[in-house]
Amino acid sequence: MDDIASTESPLEAAARTVGIDTTDALELLADETRLAILLALWEEHEPHADDAVPFSRLFDRVDYDNRGNFSYHLEKLEGQFVTQHTERGGYELRTSGLKLVRSLIAGTGLDDVSVNGAGIDELCPICEAPTTINYQDGVVLWTCTECEGVAPDVSEWGTLKDHMDGVLGFAQFEPAGVADRTPAELRAASAVAEHQRARSMFDGLCPTCSGRVDGRLEYCRDHDSNGVCDTCGWMLRLFAQFQCRTCEEYVDIDTKQLALFHPAVVAFYENHGISTRFHADDPESARRLFDLMTGHEEELVSEDPLRVAVRVTVDGEEVSVTFDDTASIVDVSR
């Protein structure tokens, strides 16, 4: 093993973990001309058009000084990120190329953005103190200005740990989405993003790579219900955890929120004139959905086998959704 390690390049060593196709794709991008070609093709891209970009226009747009070398770099991208359409006399991005450029744009945004302690008109659901919105390292953090929040001592936050004081909620959110949004709109938009991400994971589809997702319920056996538990470090005793088998994307979801993903619960609310829809540009609708979710009641029905029931009650009527240890729904009753 030592002999192998001593002769391998870092990229070859990485291939043993992530696969040769992944490292080959990354190696293709290790040249600014190829990146310029991808960006130029994206700038020429029209979603509903059926036109390819001619070589001459692409060459002029990139403003390269050697047609032979330019052709070499373009050919390197073909098959993986670019397609040549001979019948239409030009080139266009493959789906993988479009996703790559879009992820770069979403990940950087228009500017280097951050939000620090911006107040919003929403009180803490724990202590009713004022709350703020922060944006750090690609994550929107909703925090209380006074209490310790829901999980102050969790160590796995990594680079975000220094910003987790009083955290009430958090959501992955691309920098491009922060532009032109007020703090309240950012709270709503990030809630929509996290809800959709959680729904996709719950449905077994990774929103990042389309891989398979495994789910499981987690609960603290010795939970202290008075504030944040000394045993688990969370205010929540029960939550669902989903993780992608391929890219290891993961999400932790309050089991109370899981109930909103079942059509019986949605229909139950609709029958009582209550909408479970919310919009990224409507902070009030996001707040209403959060209030619905926190109003659900959860019960640990059994530990072996693990069963958790979430009950929704409106006007004396009730619907109950039961989950097993894989966070899958096993029963719905009214």
Image (spheres, rainbow, N blue to C red):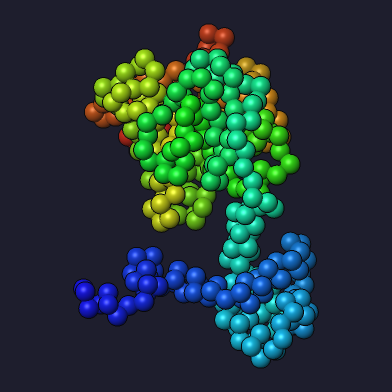
Please name whichever residue, 191 or 202, is drawn nearer the observer in this view of the structure. Answer: 191
Quadrant in the picture for residue 69: bottom right
Residue at (70, 66) in percent of width and height: 42
Residue 101 screen position, x and y as percent: 63, 63
Query: Is 222 placed above or below 107 here?
Result: above
Residue 317 screen position, x and y as percent: 52, 12
Residue 295 screen position, x and y as percent: 51, 17
Query: Is 71 placed above or below 290 here?
Result: below
Residue at (33, 33) in percent of width and height: 218
Please name whichever residue, 70 or 81, is drawn nearer the observer in this view of the structure. Answer: 70
Please name whichever residue, 310 or 70, is drawn nearer the observer in this view of the structure. Answer: 70
Query: Is 245 placed above or below 149 here?
Result: below
Residue at (62, 17) in percent of width and height: 272
Quadrant in the picture for residue 89: bottom right
Please name whichever residue, 319 or 145, is drawn nearer the observer in this view of the structure. Answer: 145
Residue 209 screen position, x and y as percent: 49, 56
Q: Which residue is the extreme one toward the top?
A: 316
* Left-right relation of 158 to 301: right
Q: Is residue 333 visible?
A: no
**Figure quadrant of the N terminus:** bottom left
Residue at (36, 76) in percent of width and height: 9
* Left-right relation of 171 to 182: left
* Left-right relation of 88 to 94: right
Q: Is residue 166 visible?
A: yes
